[in-house]
Amino acid sequence: MILLFGTLFFILLAIGVPVAFSLGLSSLFYIITADASLIIIPQRMFAGADSFSLMAIPFFVFAGEVMNKSGVTKRIVEFAASFVGFVRGGLAHATIVANIIMAGISGSTTADVAALGSMLIPSMVEAGYDRSYSTSVNAAAATIGSIIPPSILMILYGSITGISIGALFVSGFIPGLIVGFGFMIVCYFLARRNPALYDGKSLDFSLKRLVLSFFKAVPALTMPVIIVGGILSGVFTATEAGAIASVYGILVGLFLYKEIRIKDFPDLIVDSANVTGMAMLIVSSAILFSWILAIEEIPVMIGTFVTSLSSNPHIVLFIMILSMLVIGCFMDTTAAAIIMVPVYQPIASAMGLNQIHFALVMVLTFIIGGVTPPVGITIYVATAVGKTKFGKVVRNMWPFLAVLLVVLLLIAYVPSISLFLPKLLGQV
């Protein structure tokens, strides 16, 4: 029966049924065929979503919506363009820098590609960049939003495992910056190789413009400091940090930039609720799905199989990474995390791998899944924003995927990169 359950799930995915409904319908099939009570479905879905840590998700989503509406996103883009826009491939570099800064606010890859892509893709096309390339740069750069804190994916991981979310946040800083720097190297060499497609009109460097744009962006640059600093100092939890970020965004929009009005709040709340509702439906369905896997002892079987292949922790780690990359090609990032974390995290602990280090490896692996076909949610969002074809964007994604894979392996086999800051700050 478990074989039919799994087969049905992949068939539903293959024919284009949304991930949340694929998870839910296959779980419903299992419960009916197992002659179990249907009351299990709402019980498990509600129990899984009833988490204080997960309450951070709607707060950070709302904070991101407020920041977009209040003009913070626009000022981040202006600062990034002033900072690196004069380099060869300037607007591509500005896109990456803007996403690094935006990562410290929203914590969501899809939110970043939608918010920044809507401004930067048209600007890049107007400056002479190829539209598909512009879209792929924005899709790739948006992945940084789930690495640099606050990261919704890390909040989800911490809620599943009980690992310190603050420590997870700190571990993502250096890897996120490495990914961003790697992307900028790719953009620079592509611009040199084929300026007609990968380069455009660059800005002249202006110290005055840089200083002015910096001061305008200070409120945005301050938010990550408040969020992470507050969590690490014990002033508030990650969930409370989300609420504080929302209030901070409202104050900036209302009184500093004055680009948000009271009458805008109903739309902001509805938009945030829509995004949160979609995310939590996937979370709840994935939790029900993973519960079925647990009672069928699938994690135990997978764990036994993986450890039987080798007793070498490095080889076992590589096998887990490889399998998660394959799974990430077919599943939503959130669903993959909920299902696979309870399977592989105990194996990593048994092999003596540091929990924070392994958590970051898993997060990076799931992020790569979000930008790989056929179920690359980030690419689909970027394609819609950039108004171009999925296949063209995928073809331009390969150099950026190569960077992500190299960084993933670097982080996996050089733990000190991800653990340096947590150890420095006494988090591990």
Image (cartoon, grey):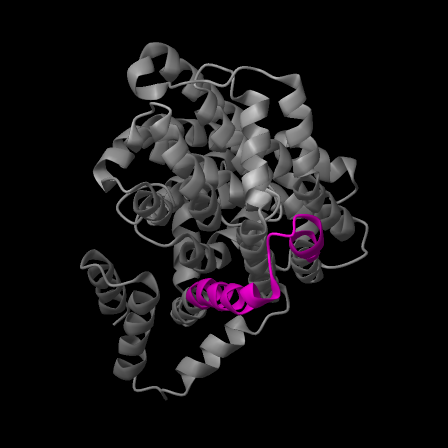
Relative to 50, is 203 above or below?
A: above
Q: Quadrant of the C terminus?
A: top right
At horizontal 30% and vertical 26% (from top left) the residue drawn is: 130
Relative to 199, is 153 above or below?
A: below
List x then y, in percent, for residue 118: 41, 43
Q: Quadrant of the N terminus?
A: bottom left
Q: Quadrant of residue 400?
A: top left
Residue 14 magenta-drawn?
Answer: no
Q: Is residue 41 visible?
A: yes
List x then y, in percent, for residue 35: 30, 87
Between 33 and 426, the one lying in front of the other is 426
- Dominant SS type (magenta): helix
Q: Is residue 179 visible?
A: no
Between 368 and 142, the one lying in front of the other is 142
Residues in magenta? 251-280
Q: Taking 363 as reference, is 123 left or right? A: left
List x then y, in percent, for residue 192: 38, 10
List x then y, in percent, for residue 127: 38, 24
Q: Quadrant of residue 39?
A: bottom left
